[in-house]
Structure formats: C-alpha cells, structure tokens
Amino acid sequence: MPAHLVDRDPQVTPQQMAAALVPPPQFADASFASYRPDPEYPSQAAVRDAVETFVATRPEPAKRGLFGRRREPAQPARSGVYLDGGFGVGKTHLLAAAYHAEPSRKTFGTFIEYTALVGALGFQGTVDLLRGTSLVCIDEFELDDPGDTMVMTRLIKELSESGTRFAATSNTPPGALGEGRFAAQDFLREIQAMSDRFDTMRIDGLDYRRRAVDESARTVDDVAGALPEGSTTLDDFRAVVAHLASVHPSKYVALVEGLDAVGLTDVQAFADQTDALRWVALVDRLYDAQVRIVASGTPLDQVYPQVMLDGGYRKKYLRAASRVVALSRAAD
C-alpha cells in the first residue's frame, strides 16, 4: 500500500544539512572521463577540459613584500569557474566531476542548500563551517530572492579571500542573473561583484534527456496500478502542492528520501507562480534522487501557463519540464 507524501514532515538538523553537501547519488561516480560531449557542440569538450584544468591547477600563494606584508595583485585573481548553458548539457555532471577530482576538503550543494545552511547556522556560523574548504561547488545558482543572492555573494567574497575556490552552474551567466526579475541597484552591484570573481564558460548543446526524440511527460489512467514495487507514495497533485507550502525547500531532500516512485493524481496547470516555483524545487530533488514519477491528468511538462513561461523564470520551468519527462519515462 503506497504511503502519502503529504504525511511526511522531515526534521533536518544543521549538522545533517552540512553532511549532505555531497553530489546526488546519480553523480556519485561522475568524472571528466565519463562525461560524453556532443561532437556537434565543441564547447562541451572545451569546457570539460577547462574545468579539469581549473581543478588540477593549484593557486599560487600570495607573495609577501617588505616587512612580511601581503602584496595584493594588480588584478584580483578569479576564484572560480561559472558554467553557463541550457539544461541537459551536462553542467551538473562536470560540477560533480570537479568535486570528485578535488583532493582536498570540498563541498557540493545547490544554491538553496547553501542559503538554507545560512538560515540554520547564521552567516558567520556558515563561514566558520566552510572556512578552509578548498573547493565549494554550487549547483543551480538561482534568484528566487534577491536577499538570498546577496547572502551568497557575501559568502563567496568572504571565503574566496581565505583561499576557497568555487565552481558554479546556472542557466544564466552571472552578469545577467536577475534579468526580468529584480532591478534594485544594490542588487545589481552584488551580482556584478560576484561576476567579477568567476571565469564564465559557455556550454552549448541540446538537452541530452531529449536528444533522441521530443517527448512529453508520460501520463496513465490508473496511477495506483502503475506504481512500481518498492517505497512509493500516492497523492492528489494539488494536495502535494499545498503541502510544499508548509515544508521549507531545504527539507525537500529529506521529503523524498528513500522513495522509489511518487504517484500523483489529477495533475493540473498552475495558477500561482509561488506554487509553481515550489514544485520546481521538488522536481530538482526528485531528479537528484532519481525518483520515478507516475501521474495522471495534465502532462507534468505542460503545467506552466504561457504567462509564466514568458516571465523571468522561463529557464527554470523548462529545466523542470525536461526533468519530469525523464522521470515519468524512467521505466520505458
């Protein structure tokens, strides 16, 4: 008998959050050698090689001048690489490969996981926890909240000044983050400060999940009957969306932990953008854990009205649409 996702209310401690800063299971063995660049897009192989070189190259220690004072370089060294490209071109694979190739202390997490850590430990507590880390990997750098982004740019500045390096991914280059969403000048200054610390690398290409054929998310008439063996849940789609409002996104990892599949009945298009964004955050966690989706109603890649797709979160919605197609067809 399937359980219910809406009955899950995970409690996560700051220590558990910190311990979870590792690549998701599907990228546990990701390496530069296992990355398969599309020969039609040379930038994929070029970026792979550039990131591998970045990780392998040890930064030179700061030189000391007269009386032992540290000399600041004429041009501040870039402290990170930023992988910009559409969804499904292998950015997360390369980020995980960088994590695995780094021999010293390192962390890997999504943007929301790091900001949640700040919320749990405080800014200085998070700095103290991460100080001494050689490489911090940030997946899916997002801008749902300008305050969160300012916190992250402060964190990057603080840690980079103590020698930490960064590798990050997003669907939008750092100089353009926030386009169509926020226009506050102080926010834009924060974004520019972050952009100045990274070498941006553009990856072109098609979504590998949909290269073979342009498919839609699979739907079934009988969700309960189509659920696979194992640990599963069965819920009304609208009930799940409502439940997400009561669970902080930082806990979505724990919300789907241990599940083999989730069943969703009567899927309907979104009318509220906040609900849609929470759903996108859940899809990311389902995808990381490779939890199969069995659903009825509207195909899950078609739940975003055109007005939402025309807004500032377009790339985010399209990424989620790509991922639910893959998860709904996992058994095909």
Image (cartoon, helix red, strand yellow):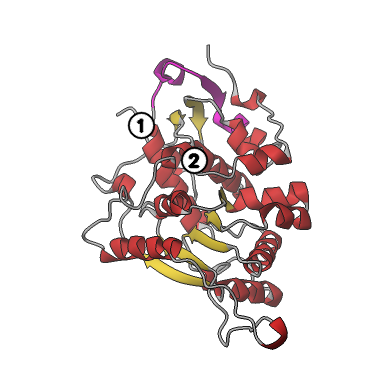
Pointer 1: residues within 10 angstroms few (<14), some, or many (20+)? some
Q: Residue at x 51, y 43 (%)?
A: 284
Quick check: 281 left or right of 150?
A: left
Pointer 2: residues within 10 angstroms few (<14), some, or many (20+)? some
Total numbered labels: 2
- The amino acid type of the residue labelled 2 equals Pro
Residue at disc 2, secondary structure: loop
Tell me where the magenta segment starts and ends, as one range: 220-240
Is residue 269 among what the camera can see?
Answer: no
User: Looking at the image, is mark 1 or mark 2 nearer the viewer?
Assistant: 2
Name the foreground residue: 174 vs 120.
120
Name the foreground residue: 4 vs 80.
80
Instruction: Classify 332 as above or below 314.
Output: above
Q: Residue at x 37, y 48 (%)?
A: 31
Q: Is residue 237 magenta?
A: yes
Which of the labelled discs sits on residue 24, or is there none?
Answer: 2
Residue 232, image x, y percentages: 51, 21
Residue at disc 1, secondary structure: loop
The image quadrant that residue 332 belongs to is: top left
Query: Label 1 to label 2, Cα distance in Å?
Result: 17 Å
Which of the labelled discs sits on residue 330, or is there none?
Answer: 1
Is residue 207 among what the camera can see?
Answer: yes
Q: Is residue 92 magenta?
A: no
Residue 41, image x, y percentages: 26, 63
